[in-house]
Amino acid sequence: MKVSHQFTYLTLLTLKKLISSLSERNKFKVSIYLGKVFFNILKLRRTVAEKNLKNAFPDWSHEKINLILERTYIFFCSNLINFISFPYSWKNIQFSVSGKSFLEDSFSSGKGIIMITGHFGSWEILGKWLGDYAELFVGIAFKQKNVGAHRFFIEQRELSNTKHIFKRESFNKMYDVLKQNGILGLVSDQDAGKRGVFVNFFGIPASTPKGVALFHVNKKSPMIFATCVQEGLLKYKIEFVPISSSEKTIKSITQEYTQILENYIRKHPEQYFWFHRRWKTVKL
């Protein structure tokens, strides 16, 4: 590991120790402060986020877009702070869970579960719940270029028994999770370039990864969409929605779960990660 990467890892460990010593209310105060700094001063990826919000909500005023965007910065600063302070931030969390029966019914097939989510809500908290719930929960993840940061984030996620398979690893590893009747988790809402399938997202064609649909077509494993909405300090609502596209084509499956994600975003727009270029690839 490079010296700079070692420094990153040690810095994150130090931050974890410092943040974990704060009360929940003080952590939220820090989140508000950092969110306002990122929104007003650093303006990190603000141009991209503003453009995405205008695409999704063309009728919104400039003032409303700014209001939601500021809340988005604060929300994700809070998420990051809570994640860095795992497992201390799990204390006193209150969950309400809807659709748990869909998980139980799906396990009875013996083919595992293809779990889909997006960069929406508190997905790291969702991973913690699933890691505790399932005998085998494996998420497909990217390797970060900074080895120190990568090590820290993977260690944090695996505190709750979550396992990982990384992009470009053998597909057999992913299929093995389903063979073992485990949950294979995919975050499937980023631009997939020319290799993706175009589906409507807020009425605009968006290139979307095919992985979810391909796993289902090849293995016939049940598909479930999952979200974790933050409803208040330490209060989270987890919901599971089965994907039951009647056509069972790559496009119809992808469109169905993308529409479900859009419906949630419309209810809680400040909890969506507007900072990636969702409509980067243009449909010709």
Image (spheres, rainbow, N blue to C red):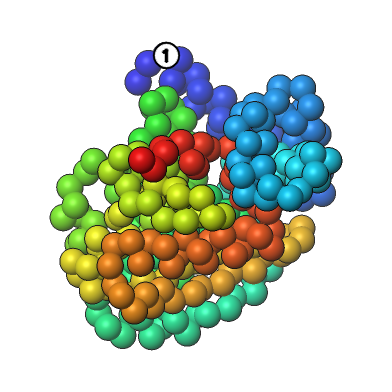
Please state which amino acid type lies under the numbered disc 1. Answer: Val
Q: Look at 47% across and 60% down and name the residue there.
A: 258
User: Is disc 1 placed on a helix, strand or loop?
Assistant: helix
Residue 212 is situated, as x and y percent measured from the top left of the image, at 32, 60
Residue at the front extreme, as displayed:
284
Residue 118 is situated, as x and y percent measured from the top left of the image, at 50, 54
Q: Look at 16% across and 55% down and name the residue there.
A: 172
> Image quadrant for the C terminus?
top left
In the foreground, 181 or 213: 213
The residue where tag 1 is placed is 3
Residue 19 is situated, as x and y percent measured from the top left of the image, at 69, 38
In the foreground, 50 or 275: 50
Q: Is residue 71 visible?
A: no
Horizontal side of 214 relative to 243 (left or right) equals left
Q: In this figure, what is the number of numbered marks?
A: 1
Instruction: Please tell me in which quadrant of the rendered image residue 144 appears.
Output: top left
Instruction: Please tell me in which quadrant of the rendered image residue 61 appears.
Output: top right
Q: Is residue 196 visible?
A: yes
Q: Look at 64% across and 74% down and name the residue there.
A: 96
> Image quadrant for the N terminus?
top left
In the foreground, 190 or 1: 190
Instruction: Please tell me in which quadrant of the rendered image residue 181 appears.
Output: bottom left
Horizontal side of 173 relative to 96 (left or right) equals left
Q: Look at 47% across and 56% down and name the residue there.
A: 200
Residue 230 is situated, as x and y percent measured from the top left of the image, at 68, 60
Q: Is 98 above or below relative to 167? A: below
Q: Is 82 above or below relative to 50? A: below
Q: Is 181 above or below relative to 92? A: below
In the foreground, 177 or 26: 177
